[in-house]
Amino acid sequence: MSAEVTLENVWIRFGDFVAARAVDINIRQGEFFSFLGPSGCGKTTLLRAVSGFLSPSEGRVLIGGKDMAGIGPNKRPTALIFQNLALFPLMTVWENITFALEVRGVSAARRRKRADELLELIALPGQGEKMVDELSGGQRQRVAIARALAAEPGVLLLDEPLSALDLKLRQHMRTELRDIQQRVGITFIYITHDQGEALTMSDNVAVMREGVIEQVADGNTIYDRPATAFVASFVGENNLLRGTVSAVSRAAVTVDTGLGAIRARAADSGGKGSLAVGDDAYVFIRPESLKFDEEKKMDNNISAQIHQQEFEGSFWQVFFSIKGSERKLKLSMVNDGSAMSHQPGQRVTLGFAPELAVATPAGPLAAE
Amino acid sequence: MIAALREAVVRGGLLTRIGLALFAACFFVYLFGPLVLMGITAFNSSAFPRVSPWECFSVEWFEVLRNDQTLVEGLRNSVFIGIGVVALAVPIGLAGALMLMQINQRVRPWYYTVVISPILVPGVVLGISTLVFWDRVGIMFNASHETFFYNGFFLTIVGQATFISAYSMLVFISRLQRFDPALEEAALDLGATHVQTFRKVLLPFLKPAIASAAVLAFLASFENYNTTVFTIVSESTLTTVLASKVRYGINPSISALAVIIVVVTLLGAAVFEVVKRREQKAARESEKVARGEVPARARRKPLLLDPAMFLILAVFVAGLGTVYFAGTVGVEECKAAVKEEKQRVAQERVRKLQQQRMFQRAAPVAGEGEGEGGSAPAAPQAQREDSSGFESIFAPQNLKEQVESGPPAAGTESFQGIFAPENLESQSGAGQ
């Protein structure tokens, strides 16, 4: 039975330290929802509040519409997949998988049957008699998922479960996780600091910084329309230009950056204070939105000097130095077979469309 | 440092190597010499525990040990108290260790110091304070002296458990430090109650530690003397019996007991080693399985079918059989021969004494003494070493044996006065 999860004005404090600040989130039933943020941003703390290992200092956690205050982790319809998996080392694979049934007093015969079904689901048929340490990393991962699913939870919570795997396996497990979620149809809440994981798997992503939810949206929106400077700098690569707002129209703002006036789309900050004339603002342009524009056909133009070029197979990465900034601008373009005609040191004019640039209020950025 | 030592051995000259070998030999002799010597004395039929003079290889002292009621009772009490201490100290130690893992970081060092302090307190103090404390409690409840407040078993178990539970706590702490708390959370998260989590996750993990703590607690209780001597009141344990025996005269049955304890310990250590190696082997195998190098095998063979285990048992049984056979067959004949030889030597000595006195009194009668000396070399076959026959002259019990002419095993009490000088005097008087 899939369940929805609602966090209402949740605050979590440890002494003076605030791990979660006025978190309001509604996770729909059957949704694949991710919390994305750098380590130490409080995402694991929120997960523990949902699973019941700690109670919020303030606010409510509702699962399936029921307030979870005073309900312990063993009474909640949640199952947690731990970062280190926490498989029971002294039990066989099938005993691990059916632990949740064992503590409910289900007979051994019925547990064996259920274990076989789940082993089938995670594509490890006939491996039930093995000990956990006889499995490879990816297999353990799947056993942990099966063990959590055996409890028939309404919500599956995953705490960076792929972080211990190597890159290839991680990418494979992403698709597999998504597959399993669609097959079982329950709500998944996924914690990660890896934006690739969050963006590829999730229906919705919440980006967190220092206990605050910066933006909740689907992956496309997060990438294309970041709400804050932090989201824009944390998710994907972005070129940053600093400036002051000189004009505001309905859909666009003009920012004076010292490289000329730049028109950009105003970030949708969700009513948390939008840009006004005279505000400090950041303009973010994705490397793939930046083009060579010697004829100045585009609305925004910057002059720059080529610093360095890198060939990455399917892409060219070109770095530019610009006036008044230590940061290099980065342009990436598809390698369509045409040879690069530019040389380092060459002066060029770059252009980009205003709707592909985002202006946000100046604010904290993600650590490089 | 060990590496440096190894370097010195490899690089160093012959002299260094000889020096090190000598040092190692001294070290091992120092460590095990007393044990080996004591073990040997258990099989010497001589009534006093000694290696030389060697009389007869015999297992009679094991028989004496078995028939020594005070010792057997002390042993029984020690085992009983040991079990009681295990039953009390292991749960207390486990609770203490669990508590340590859960309390606040800041309080932890204080707590640790408090619970570990019984180990640092001298056992004598623990013994006396246990006695005094329960006496006070008994008085508080107006209890008579037949109640458990004054019972030696109760007091000893309680008294020993005060510090032995701290020992077992240390065992549990070291194991718990390797416990992943996420396992406990995982169990709770999957719907287990706290009791189920403890029983199904934590307890199986602690099983080896429980076994070690129990063994440690039992041994610590078994060999304890300085606390027990106060708390045991009117009862006795093996250690208190042994202590009183040493005070009032000793015979090789004590060595026999030592042999039994050493053999049991060695056997236990060997079995433990076999079990450990099996586990390591199993761990290596499962790693290989995980890497996909070998297919998973069915369950392991039972322990008793393990070749190493079988070998240990075979050696033990064979050794036991050999010793028993050698120690019982032909012992009487050997002892009779030894006794005969002793009597002969003693008579010769008496005769020499008489001759001396005769010389002193008056005219020396030449030739008689020489004649006697000439007949002496007809040594009996049972005498294994020439020197032993003469050394035994100075052993006072020889003289006594001669007088009483009883078998040496007959009564241990009869040897208690061995060192009393009047025995010697009366003997030589009788010889005259």
Image (cartoon, coloured by chain):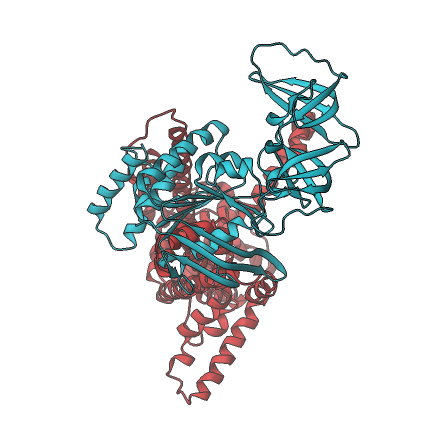
Chain colours: A cyan, B red
Towards the viewer: A43 or B229: A43
Residue A63, horizontal then vertical, whole percent: 39, 56
Q: Residue at x 54, y 59 (%)?
A: A12
Q: Quadrant of the N terminus of chain B?
A: top right
Q: Would you say residue B211 is visible in this rendering?
A: no
In this rendering, is residue B79 above or below B336? below
* The residue positioned farthest toward the right in the image shown: A324
- Residue B415 falls in image quadrant: bottom left
Residue B82, horizontal then vertical, whole percent: 40, 63
* The residue positioned farthest toward the left in the image shown: A109
In this rendering, is residue B337 above or below A300? below
* The residue positioned farthest toward the front in the image shown: A249
Q: Residue at x 47, y 51 (%)?
A: A47
Q: Is residue B366 left or right of residue B231?
A: right
In this rendering, is residue A65 above or below B53? below
Q: Would you say residue A150 is visible in this rendering?
A: yes
Q: Is residue A165 left or right of residue A209?
A: left
Towards the viewer: B311 or B141: B141
Towards the viewer: A354 or B51: A354
In this rendering, is residue A277 above or below B422? above
Q: Is residue B19 left or right of residue A5?
A: right
Residue A276, horizontal then vertical, whole percent: 68, 47
Q: Is residue A90 left or right of residue B10?
A: left
